[in-house]
Image (tube, rainbow, N blue to C red):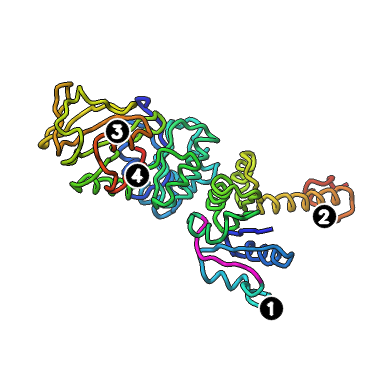
Amino acid sequence: MFIVVVGAGRVGSSLSRAMLADGHEVSCLDEDPESHARLDTGLERSWEDSGGQFTVGTGLEVDALRAAGIERADAFVAATDGDNTNIIISQIAKRKFDVPMVVARILDPLRASWYEEQGLHTICPTRIAIDMLEAEVRQAAEKLSSGALTGRGNGGGGEPEA
Amino acid sequence: MPEKMYAIVVGAGKVGWNLGRELIEKGHEVTLIEKDQDRYQTVEQELEHNVQYGDASELWVLERAGISRADMVIAVTGDDEDNMLICQVAKEKYLVERIIARVNNPRNREWFDLLGVRPHVSATDLILRLIEHEVPDYGLIHLLDLPEERLEIIEMLLADDSPVAGEKVGDLNLPEGSLLISVLRDGRGFVPGPDTVLEAGDEILAVLDPGVEEDLKRFFGSDGTEPETSQVGKV
């Protein structure tokens, strides 16, 4: 399929390379021309020679979106470093350009969950990290109270020392 | 508008700071939210507890400012995405009845409309409209757009070859959904009666339903080649 990715930072560029490697057509849009170098990283040939597209511009510029090919995109990923930018441009992709699959990276869990409820598909890395850390700490607490883990002997939520 | 309302103003730049001060002087309750620490401290020296420090696109910051009881949210930061998001959340999540958003880049106007963030105000557009008003040879000018109420007030100059020049107002068969409300002649405005005879060079003010502009332009003989006026800055 044809994927438009806005934001060629760490997340956007890795995702773009992975999708290209899977055999998809990928077009990246970033306001910083230098971000192109990140797309080349680890590729044998340049991003373009490997089949990728790169456009300089922002996700709010209708000309840049069109140049990146949004009108024929099957999927749209908003992965800039700005939560609000990602929220706004993914709504543009959905409402103005009818892109069938739209997903936005949103770091703030509160904004992510509210917009998810409104029907915007969001990925919240912070939420994922919180959930994983919670699970990790809970697991340690359980091990401690069951005796599988040796604590420092100062309680810490486990059974008081005999 | 309630006599005394509670307004949250986001962004304590030049616009927000002055706006906040004016609203307070008019007796309204105001909270300004500013995310830049230095700027916050500067403004706080004058407006004290009326300013809060924080990023208003974080929902808890809006909640701390009491958004659920706000009568109005005005987003005037220098960032269009922030203004759109804050107003969208204010309107759709917190059900704030009145929102006003500042448009920094007129090209983003389309997105404010797309997301239902209205009314929005753009200084660039306001100035452009003034320029159009000052330029003698113009077509149709929007003086006021009230999209919610479905009402517009426009101004038009009657050209020398206007088919209505020399006609009595009472004899005019105006396009449906339009009403002539005033005539400006020789720098003086008056409400026309049925016997008023229109002259070339008159400026007329009309109130109309949206979508009647083109009919009205044809009616008064503007050939439509004048600078296109925009549907902008719906104040």
Q: Position of residue B203 (x, y in %)?
A: 18, 36
Mark 4 — residue? B230
- Mark 4 and mark 1: span between their CA atoms? 51 Å
Q: Which one is earlier in the sequence, the residue at label 2 or at label 1? A: 1
Circle 1 Cα neighbour tier, 10 Å, few/some/many (<14 / 14–19 / ≥20): few
State which mark lies toward you, 3 or 1. 3
User: Contact, CB < 8 Å: mark 3 with mark 2?
Assistant: no
Local SS, label 1: loop
From the top left corner, tell me how far across and down residue A158 is, in percent.
82, 46
**What is the chain letter for disc 1?**
A
Task: Verify whether residue A53 appears in magenta.
Answer: yes
Q: Which residues are magenta?
A: A51-59
Closer to the chain start, of discs 4 and 3, is: 3
Q: Residues under labels 2 and 1: Cα distance? A: 50 Å
Q: Helix, strand or loop at disc 4?
A: loop
- Determine which residue is flagged by label 2: A151
